[in-house]
Image (cartoon, rainbow, N blue to C red):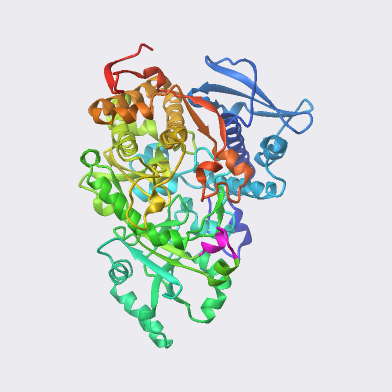
Amino acid sequence: MTMSPSLDRPASAVTHLHPDVWRKVNRLLVRKAIAEFAHEQVFEPEWLAEASRAGWGRYALVADTQGCRYRFEARRMALRHWHVDASTIEREVDGQLQPLDALTFVIDFKRTLGIPSDKLPVYLDEISSTLYGAAYKHERPALSSAELADADYQTVEAAMIEGHPGFVANNGRLGFDALDYHAYAPETGSRFAIVWLAVHRDNAHFASVPGLDHETLLRQELGERQLVEFRRQLAGDGLDPAHYLFMPAHPWQWFNKLSIMFAADIAERRIVPLGLGDDRYCAQQSVRTYFNSSQPGRCYVKTSLSVLNMGFMRGLSPYYMAGTPAINAYLDRLISADPVLRDYGFGILREVASVGYRNRYYEAALETDSPYKKMLSALWRESPMPRLKTGERLMTMAALLHVDPQGTPLLPELIRRSGLAPQAWLRRYLRAFLEPVVHCFYAHHLVFMPHGENLILVLEGHVPTRVFMKDIAEESAILDKDAKMPAGLERLAVDVPEDYKILGIFIDIFDGVFRHMSQLLDDSGCLAEDAFWRTVAESILDYQRAHPELAERFARYDFFAPTFLHSCLNRLQLKNNLQMVDLANPAGSLIMADPLDNPVAPHAPVRSPRGAPRDEALPV
């Protein structure tokens, strides 16, 4: 049983850390490290023999540490996926079995992993923090997958255990101390008030979608009473409220960064702390986005949060914020005007307004991109709650990969409760999620980052019927450098190599979501792996047959190509865990392993001369 820690009870920060849970989470993280590093060909496990279970083998990894090797049982699956049985992992040193320890695992393979020596301690910190959080999540009172199948949106959000399914060090959050973890980590379910600041217009910029101004936004998000009180505070200090914009900040950011690093601006009253807002928020899985639990119909708030997590300091650029609402408005018009997407019920949660504040000292000192330029920005994103119809509810798509502390996955439970056959449920899900995302790519060259945390499923009962995409401005692009964009939105049109363009589907969806889903379904006896991929293929074949006008693009960017490039996430983080991608040239930063065999290629259609699929498929 965990308890909220406090400064006068130091031990209360670590009540979830004890030998049993520590052994459990270390074994699980070592399992993930073996599986994901082998998937990315950082490791090449050695085949030893067949295991007692059909389709399974016994493997070994020889460590860099002299006399050390790891043995385990695993099953090879599509997409070079390693299904490793955690219970079979053994660490042997000079013939003697040793306890499993994730930090020791990294040290055992430090040369193979290739982590630069100056960044290795930071990576170890991220592993420690990931283990700390994992121990909390496995030790707390938790809903079973059966109970979670009927839980409300924010209960599901806080119940997630794994975080990003591919990254090994996926819950670093370096910068948070133990008290911060309990106060602000999404899995704690904590509610907190956000800090409101008045920032001088000379250094700040407000932007919004058409029809929304700063005054209207504040009345919607703060309410009349608090808005009047904040303006009274400014006037009482001899300051003109008309010269200021109001913006939210995370409490951690205020006390740890802004109050010190922006001290000059605070002293000169360019930044004025107004106090805490009345509403209470809960952090979402992305940590720096907060759901209004007091008034769920109000916007999400997303703010700069200068903690290091999964390869980046999680700031927000004031320059990007200036263009964010216009990009959201443009994409919303594009999506709303497409009758195909309307029929799917596909929508985005618009980032409707933003404020960015520039620190004049860092701007003058630094000529290149830097986290120091991204410490004070915020945006407001639409809540999905007002869009729900009677009988609908919400669930993060990350929940489809959730496994409870007892080892039971949620996805088969949802399928069982739906009353549908597994393939029928999967087709409904693919129609809600995959088909509209694929249509955005083929019809509009539009790509998102459609991983689990960025999608919100709309369920009727236990069946997905439509989805909302979020994180639009920072993680969307039109893959056509010659696309005619409105003034100020040029950054949305990007130039990437031709063979990279469809990777937004293959890597973000196939590799990032579906390979894990197929393992859970196959392992639970719900749906065999081949049947899973055949159902994915059938879904897109139906889509392509319905849109012969896009046949040329279907042929140019072949969904059924024999192989596709394998862009590796952990390799990026291992190379530079402080900034794993050059944001000015993200495609040029990618690190590739050998191409992956496309699991839908065996179900490829026979194409007409113009590229459209005919009704028959090639024999499998």
* x and y percentages locating residue 156 in the rendered image: 39, 46
The residue located at (62%, 19%) in the rendering is: 58
**In the depicted view, which residue is nearer to us: 400 or 419?**
400
* x and y percentages locating residue 582 in the rendered image: 55, 49
**In the depicted view, which residue is nearer to us: 190 or 597?**
597
Residue 194, visible in the rendered structure = no
Q: Quarter of the image holding residue 386? A: bottom left
Magenta stretch: includes residue 275: no
The residue located at (44%, 21%) in the rendering is: 562
Quadrant housing the C terminus:
top left
**In the depicted view, which residue is nearer to us: 350 or 75?**
350
Location of residue 64 with respect to 386 vertically, above or below: above
Location of residue 345 with respect to 184 vertically, above or below: above
Q: Which residues fall within the magenta stretch? A: 366-375
* x and y percentages locating residue 488 in the rendered image: 37, 58
Apparent side of residue 295 relative to residue 121 in the rendered image (left or right): left
Residue 380, visible in the rendered structure = yes
Magenta stretch: includes residue 374: yes
Q: Quarter of the image holding residue 353? A: bottom left
Report the predominant secondary structure element of the magenta stretch: loop
* x and y percentages locating residue 215 in the rendered image: 30, 72
